[in-house]
Image (tube, rainbow, N blue to C red):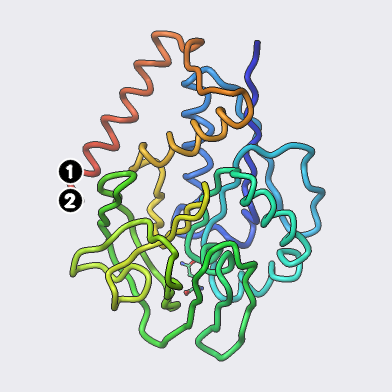
Amino acid sequence: MTKQIDVMSLYPKDMNIYGDSGNVLTIRRRLELYGYEPVIHQYNQGDDWPGHVDMILGGGGQDTGQKKIIDDFYSRADLLRSLAGDGVPMLMICGLYQLFGEYFETVDGTKLDGIGVIGAYTVGQDVRMIGNLVEHSDQFGDVIGYENHSGQTFLRDGTRPLGHVDADGCGNNGEDHTEGARVNNVIGTYMHGSLLPKNPAISDFLIETAATRRYGSFDASDQTPEQAAALAHLDETAAAARRTAA
Ligand code: GLN
């Protein structure tokens, strides 16, 4: 039986900077190597929503990109909230992480309401937070990436961060050492990089959750020895990048 997994790339035209499209490529490749059949749906403003979605990947964007997609995003807000509530795994980087929160007030004073999946709000400041970042996550261990944002995000009481950053990184706001957020199976984070090629534990969480929701379990028994070797090679490459960063 071919086990198809439907992956949505959310607003790749306007929300895709600092290599975020690499997350989609990584998920596609790892799904193939586990013996699944990935189907990638690119969703941009005005597109039809696909009939079935197992996972949603969203990238970062300039404030201008966020303003471009916002009306379409609001038209999909109920759907996204209900999919998140149902446990669909989602990864939202930077600009879309901010818009999954309550609001983002940009540095020029424009207030963009978010869709409130994540209990957090973001306020733009003049000084950008830029640099390589290492965070420590209970669920995923050390997570490595790169941040570049003007928005400072503050988690509401009770919102779980994805992890905690050392003194070198800024993370959510440069003040409280938190980075990102975790709600149901939604991960919000400032980590570009791309994130997923360097952090296989997060890729596998998204894949295993998607497969389990759709087929009842995650099952890589169709994997060939060649695919297993190729996957091990990807993981070694990631491990080397992680050793350099840590
Ligand atoms: N425009 C947002 C900010 O500067 C998000 C940037 C990003 O996605 N890297 O905070």
Query: Residue lying furthest bottom in this view?
Result: 109
Residue on which the image places disc 1: 243
Q: Quadrant of residue 177?
A: bottom left
Q: How many marks?
A: 2
Q: Residue 96, image x and y in percent?
A: 56, 63
Q: Which mark is residue 90?
A: none
The residue wearing badge 2 is 246
Quadrant in the picture for residue 103? bottom right
Q: Residues within 10 Å of mark 2 (few under 14, many from 20)?
A: few
Q: Who's the residue at 60% across and 75% down the image?
A: 64
- Secondary structure under the numbered disc 1 in the rendered image: helix
Secondary structure of the residue carrying numbered label 2: loop
Q: Residue at x 59, y 62 (%)?
A: 117
Distance between mark 2 and mark 1 Cα atoms: 5 Å
Q: Residue at x 79, y 38 (%)?
A: 51
Mark 2 touches mark 1? (CB < 8 Å): yes
